[in-house]
């Protein structure tokens, strides 16, 4: 490839559009990267194996939440998956370090300094509106002082991209990428909130976008791409829009009723929040499978199945949807992936902050990657 599209060509040129959505999940982002490496390889072969190919050449909009925001921002700037793999191994070693007196009760479990250093090193002075961001980019965070989810994106036709007459609000274009990515990763309990100036004499307190309904940002990115109010209004249709969604591993909690009833209040609250995030993710997938045609559709539950015989409105599918993820439970890993983990090992890989299990996450991610069929990526969406 000798010519790379500009951001505005990605966003506004006619033709089929492609979206990449990346879940949150802390250090489990290393699992995501194994899947992305396979996707990158498939797509590179579509352009004759050109070494200069990057995911930002193919995808017209890349968005992520929390750890997915780090990956999304880097991919949008032209990083390769191998580049990101190196970064993530460093994150595990330097960011998720246990410290005496940091238990996550009265202060955040981890010092944000090492994470901030990584983001400053990688993103430097790049802003959301910078031309060094080579394709559409969306970062999901939560402004906790107002209780609102913020979807910060670089569409120049967006209402909040540039300075508005009579407004002192900071335009989306001017937000430093390192700050908003840090905000998206500010998981309560693990990291302190991020303080960001949002207008003259006004600051917002931002936390991890995973505490919104958009830890899996897929549905929100579909809205961003197609609703008139966001300024893109891409056409719908299975031959016109492809959404690729990549997870960080999921599971269904299996607890005895007595175990739940005997939990301390703080642990019960955390368990309830985690359950709510899981419910939001399941609803996202149900809606997207209902709207789409999908080669990767999974059974949502025993009542509705995989929705392959259902389309919202009874007409043609609204989009092509692909979802890649791993089930982090012992039965799935053993019977489907052929990986034999003990229950203790399963509990360890589910954690978002344990760098000691990176290689296990890599192994799981590589299994999912090996199941990806190059035919999932239809020729109609080729460059």
Image: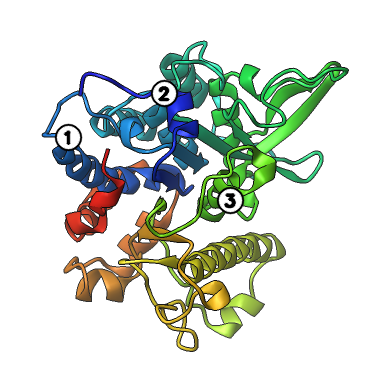
Q: Quadrant of residue 187?
A: top right
Q: As displayed, is residue 110 above or below residue 329?
A: above
Q: Residue at x 60, y 25 (%)?
A: 156
Q: What residue is shown with label 2?
A: 134
Q: Foreground: 318 or 90? A: 318
Q: Position of residue 233 (x, y in %)?
A: 58, 44
Q: Position of residue 53 (x, y in %)?
A: 23, 28
Assess whether mark 2 and mark 3 are in contact (beta carbons under 8 angstroms). no
Direction top: furthest residue = 125
Q: What residue is shown with label 3?
A: 220
Asked whether, in this view, residue 289 is left or right of residue 263, the answer is left
Q: In which quadrant will I find the N terminus?
A: top left
Q: Position of residue 352 (x, y in %)?
A: 45, 48
Q: Residue at x 53, y 45 (%)?
A: 234
Q: Residues within 10 Å of mark 3 (few under 14, many from 20)?
A: some
Assess whether mark 3 and mark 1 are in contact (beta carbons under 8 angstroms). no
Q: What residue is shown with label 1?
A: 47
Q: Quadrant of residue 313?
A: bottom right
Label 2 vs label 1, nearer the camera: 1
Looking at the rendered structure, the secondary structure element under dot 1 is: loop
Does label 2 or label 1 sit earlier along the sequence?
A: 1
Q: In which quadrant will I find the C terminus?
A: top left
Asked whether, in this view, residue 364 is left or right of residue 230, the answer is left
Specify whether residue 241 is in view.
yes
Q: Residues within 10 Å of mark 2 (few under 14, many from 20)?
A: many
Does label 3 or label 2 sit earlier along the sequence?
A: 2
């Amino acid at each position: 490839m000798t010519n790379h599209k500009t951001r505005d060509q990605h966003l506004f040129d006619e033709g089929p559009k492609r979206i990449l959505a990346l879940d949150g999940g802390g250090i489990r982002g290393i699992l995501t990267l194994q899947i992305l490496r396979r996707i990158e390889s498939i797509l590179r072969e579509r352009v004759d194996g050109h070494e200069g190919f990057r995911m930002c050449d193919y995808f017209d909009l890349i968005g992520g939440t929390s750890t997915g925001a780090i990956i999304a921002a880097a991919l949008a700037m032209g990083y390769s998956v191998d580049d990101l793999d190196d970064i993530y191994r460093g994150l595990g070693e330097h960011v998720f370090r246990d410290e005496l007196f940091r238990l996550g009760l009265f202060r955040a479990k981890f010092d944000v300094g090492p994470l901030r250093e990584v983001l400053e090193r990688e993103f430097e002075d790049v802003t959301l509106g910078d031309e060094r961001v080579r394709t559409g980019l969306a970062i999901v965070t939560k402004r906790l002082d107002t209780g609102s989810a913020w979807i910060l994106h670089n569409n120049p036709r967006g209402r909040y991209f540039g300075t508005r007459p009579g407004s002192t609000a900071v335009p989306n274009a001017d937000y430093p990428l390192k700050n908003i990515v840090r905000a998206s990763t500010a998981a309560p309990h693990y990291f302190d909130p991020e303080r960001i100036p949002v207008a003259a004499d006004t600051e917002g307190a931002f936390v991890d976008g995973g505490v919104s309904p958009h830890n899996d940002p897929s549905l929100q990115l579909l809205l961003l791409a197609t609703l008139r109010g966001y300024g893109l209004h891409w056409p719908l249709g299975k031959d016109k829009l492809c959404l690729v969604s990549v997870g960080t591993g999921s599971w269904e909690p299996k607890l005895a009723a007595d175990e739940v009833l005997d939990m301390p209040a703080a642990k019960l609250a955390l368990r309830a929040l985690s359950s709510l995030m899981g419910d939001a993710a399941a609803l996202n997938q149900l809606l997207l499978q209902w709207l789409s045609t999908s080669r990767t559709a999974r059974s949502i539950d025993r009542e509705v199945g995989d929705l392959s015989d259902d389309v919202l409105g009874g007409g043609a599918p609204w989009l092509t949807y692909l979802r890649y993820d791993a089930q982090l439970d012992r039965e799935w890993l053993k019977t489907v992936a052929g990986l034999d983990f003990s229950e203790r090992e399963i509990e360890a890989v589910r954690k978002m902050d344990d760098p000691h299990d990176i290689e296990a996450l890599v192994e799981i991610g590589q299994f999912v990657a090996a199941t990806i069929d190059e035919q999932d990526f239809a020729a109609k969406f080729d460059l």
